[in-house]
């Protein structure tokens, strides 16, 4: 972990230039998605499945302040392994709650901590978002995830033992940083993740499964191959899956122009099997 002034400046620059830009891009895509209402039920949508209980939760952060999140769990009695879902944008976009619900259907408890809780609803432009996140570093975001895990540990339906982390875009980056900093994490699944450095993930030793489309306009195949080399060079068990013709956010059915049902279904099947293998 790097704590120098230069590293802190770099983290802040990443949040200002990458996170805010991504949020604006996703906000535009979400608007476009609503304008192009789905003519049929998206193949990967499971939010209405009666076997799942889900909804908004609120939990403590730093012992005082609270942040919100979205939790889904199987309705059936029992204890289930926990998986944190780390969004690359606001968790109100429906595919994030849907991801939690899909985890519940697979026999997990899924929680998406609101790692963008510093963004007011009124912040829609890049300058507004940059101003809101300027003092919220990657370290702060990782601590938001830790707060979510602390909340999960207090729930009677959460099984003791290792947890998983699934992240999208910037959330994929955070999932890897979280895996590098927590001994509790037994599996990390980044979808088209933002860049990391060798220093940042040097302690990431649990299995990692990466998913990305070959037509991703935000994350290149070359960048994914570089990440694969980085992980394997430090002996991190690594799987990489590329989806021909799939774009950024291909699992997000809320974005019809980029949603790829075939790639999304296959990637999710692989994700579930991976989590089942590694979470006891």
Image (cartoon, rainbow, N blue to C red):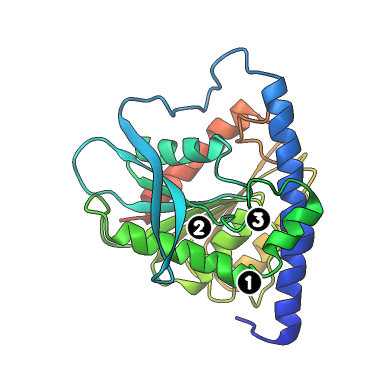
Say which of 91 and 234 sits in front. Answer: 91
Does dot 2 land on a helix, a strand or a loop? strand
Q: Is residue 256 above or below residue 270?
A: above
Residue at the left extreme of this rendering = 77
- Tell me the residue at 39%/71% (across/down): 63
Q: Is residue 65 left or right of residue 238?
A: left
**Sequence-wise first label, 2 or 1:** 2
Kindly indicate the quadrant of the structure image that contains residue 162. bottom left
Give the residue number, with chain letter if any, for mark 2.
188
Say which of 200 and 63 sits in front. Answer: 63
* Cβ–Cβ under 8 Å for marks 2 and 3: no
Picture quarter with the N terminus:
bottom right
Give the residue number, with chain letter if any, for mark 1.
233
User: What is the spatial separation of the Cα atoms under label 2 and label 3, in whole angstroms?
Assistant: 14 Å
- Percent x, y of residue 101: 41, 36
Give the residue number, with chain letter if any, for mark 3.
170
Does dot 3 land on a helix, a strand or a loop? helix
User: What is the spatial separation of the Cα atoms under label 2 and label 1, in whole angstroms?
Assistant: 17 Å
């Amino acid at each position: 972990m790097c704590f120098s002034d230069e590293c802190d400046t770099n983290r802040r620059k990443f949040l200002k230039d990458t996170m805010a830009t991504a949020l604006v891009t996703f906000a535009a895509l979400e608007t476009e998605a609503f304008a192009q209402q789905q003519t049929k039920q998206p193949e990967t949508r499971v939010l209405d499945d009666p076997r799942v209980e889900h909804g908004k939760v609120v939990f403590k952060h730093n012992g005082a302040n609270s942040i919100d999140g979205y939790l889904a769990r199987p309705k059936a009695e029992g204890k289930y392994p926990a998986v944190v879902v780390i969004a690359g944008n606001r968790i109100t976009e429906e595919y994030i709650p849907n991801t939690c619900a899909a985890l519940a259907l697979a026999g997990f408890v899924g929680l998406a901590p609101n790692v963008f809780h510093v963004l007011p609803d009124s912040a829609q432009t890049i300058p507004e978002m940059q101003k809101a996140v300027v003092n919220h570093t990657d370290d702060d975001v990782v601590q938001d995830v830790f707060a979510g895990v602390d909340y999960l540990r207090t729930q009677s339906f959460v099984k003791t033992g290792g947890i998983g982390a699934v992240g999208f875009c910037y959330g994929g980056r955070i999932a890897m940083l979280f895996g590098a900093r927590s001994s509790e994490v037994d599996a990390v699944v980044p979808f088209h993740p933002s860049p990391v450095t060798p220093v940042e993930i040097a302690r990431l030793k649990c299995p990692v499964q990466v998913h990305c489309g070959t037509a991703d306009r935000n994350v290149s195949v070359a960048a994914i191959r570089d990440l694969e080399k980085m992980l394997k060079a430090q002996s991190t068990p690594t799987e990489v899956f590329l989806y021909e013709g799939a774009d950024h956010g291909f699992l997000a059915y809320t974005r019809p122009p980029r949603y790829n049902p075939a790639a999304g279904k296959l990637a999710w099947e692989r994700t579930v099997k991976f989590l089942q293998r590694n979470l006891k």
